[in-house]
Amino acid sequence: MDIQSWTYTIVGISFAIYIGIAIWSKASSTKEFYIAGGSVPPLANGMATAADWMSAASFISMAGLISFMGRDGSVYLMGWTGGYVLLALLLAPYLRKFGKFTVPDFVGDRYYSQTARLVAVVCAIFVSFTYVAGQMRGVGIVFSRFLEVDINTGVMIGMAIVFFYAVLGGMKGITYTQVAQYCVLIFAYLVPAIFISMALTGNIVPQLGFGSDIISEPGTSLLDKLDSLQTELGFNTYTEGSKGMLDMLFITAALMVGTAGLPHVIVRFFTVPRVKDARISAGYALVFIAILYTTAPAIAAFARTNLIQSVSEQPYADVPQWFKNWEKTKLISFTDKNNDGLIQYLGDEERNELTIDKDIMVLANPEIAKLPNWVIGLVAAGGLAAALSTAAGLLLVISSSIAHDLFKKVLKPDISDKGELLAARIAAGFAVIIAGYFGINPPGFVAQVVAFAFGLAASSFFPVIIMGIFSKRMNKEGAIAGMIAGLLFTMSYIIYFKFINPMDNNADHWLWGISPEGIGTLGMCLNFLVSGIIATFTPPPPADVVEMIENIRVPNSKKA
Amino acid sequence: MSKQNNQLYWKKNLQYLAVLLLIWFVVSYGCGILFVDELDNIRFGGFKLGFWFAQQGSIYVFVLLIFVYVYLMNKLDRKYNVEED
């Protein structure tokens, strides 16, 4: 079979499975819709969390990013996994014990304030929409390249699928489709990595393979070979860094803390039955995530080596088929500056003739490595699974924020469970449509606003939740002031460098050499500082709140 | 459960957190960023050790840390008799 038939078959089967699961797991109450009835087994929750977390960016873009950044790419690897240690140790067990539906629920109850609840709702919705637009775009790219349909049609099909299982099944439907999606995406990620590792180094385990000797030159390790290829062409040495150390620290911290503060990840720990299930399911989640995250740097190194060896100084007339396929999508382009008919791929901007988009590295990797057609179809299905599972998790946060936090808790407290369920479904439906709109008409700033999502989560949610659990003295005045200070600082810094004055977005103008990607860490520190100071001068929280804090700290203590 | 029992439980929990988060900090920020160049002078198979920590080792340690935490906390829950159900 050719690539396209394989892709249609594999994607078709995976979609049929998702729809089947959605019908089987229809939600019948708000508890099922928001937190899957609180009865998800820890192992299933771990898998669902992994799929929820690993988005189109993790699946499609991350290895490519690392491939171009070399050691500097470690910020993503450590940042997006290290956050789970914080989640497991500092957040998940206590939030599970708290036992409500959403993150704004916790913020509102813990800080006995509707203002705090509303600030949290606005943050949750903003963070989630930012993220979901990127997922829909990812769906569109996969469809247009592999199934050769128009990007917009691709987005529509993706929307229809998510609409079906998110609106019908709520968290229950989403959880079990995410379990299936995890299996699809991890299989799709590992198969090409294993093939390529075998071909380049003879080692079947990619994690070991990229530190092994390459077959074509026994005695030279793959990374050493890559280092010498890179320096020959004038690029930075692959295993050395070029970012400032302080910036590396701040970006890694912002990503870790941001991960731990993302509402769609936190809410997954509300779905398990007991506190100890929340702890262990965070462990399972990180195992499932680590399988992909330790493979990614191997893929990055393999892809980079393969790419350089297959295009550098080759005649443009004889480029392989994949080169031509991806040229059509404009993700790779060649201009023969010195008219010698050969491709010069060089670190020197003036003489370099090849530009490559980072997203190609994973998607084109199987073609570059000349793997069988079914592997290419599998990668397409994996990319879709990664994008759809994350999109669904985010849409649920948006729908529960609107139906539960805004409607039930603020606007219309006397609404019946049935009415609230209907409101949640309608909100989910609208959210899918808005997300699809952004997928079809992507605002030019999608890439830039991802820094926002992490910066906001790091500078607002994370400190507020941590203090809510670990400090009995923290009061509503401190929390609100801290959230606003952290948010305003982080947002203005990002807006200034990304939108108002992008020309100055370089290390010379940054505060202490910290890039906008890492500024959330400083925003978080500011949040802690401001709330600490304000809380000292304002009255302590009331007795029932203190009692609630004591309760969430101990697994078996009864609710007040 | 008595208030005192719960407070002792909480104090022990905080001690565990302090130790585990210290290790978390050392393997990621320490080995992967602050001392990465020094560690790179050491070879670890085909890897430079600092590079390996930054792209592999830190993640393995993260996974271990969570499972150690789960083990310690389950034991602590039993010792202070605060298990659910």
Image: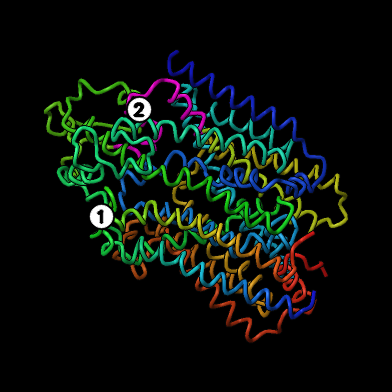
Main SS of the magenta segment? helix
Q: Which residue is mark 1?
A: B43
What label sits on residue A326 in the rendered view?
2
Segment colored magenta: A356-383
The quadrant the N terminus of chain B occupies is bottom right
Residue occupying the far bottom of the picture: A537
| Among the 4 quarters of the image, the one containing residue A346 | top left
| Among the 4 quarters of the image, the one containing residue A79 | bottom left
Q: Does A178 appear in magenta? A: no
Q: CA distance from mark 2 to mark 1?
A: 38 Å
* Whether residue B64 can be seen here: yes
At mark 1, the secondary structure is strand
Q: Position of residue A383 (x, y in %)?
A: 49, 34
Residue occupying the far top of the picture: A1
Q: Position of residue A368 (x, y in %)?
A: 32, 28
For the point 30% across and 62% down, the residue is: B36
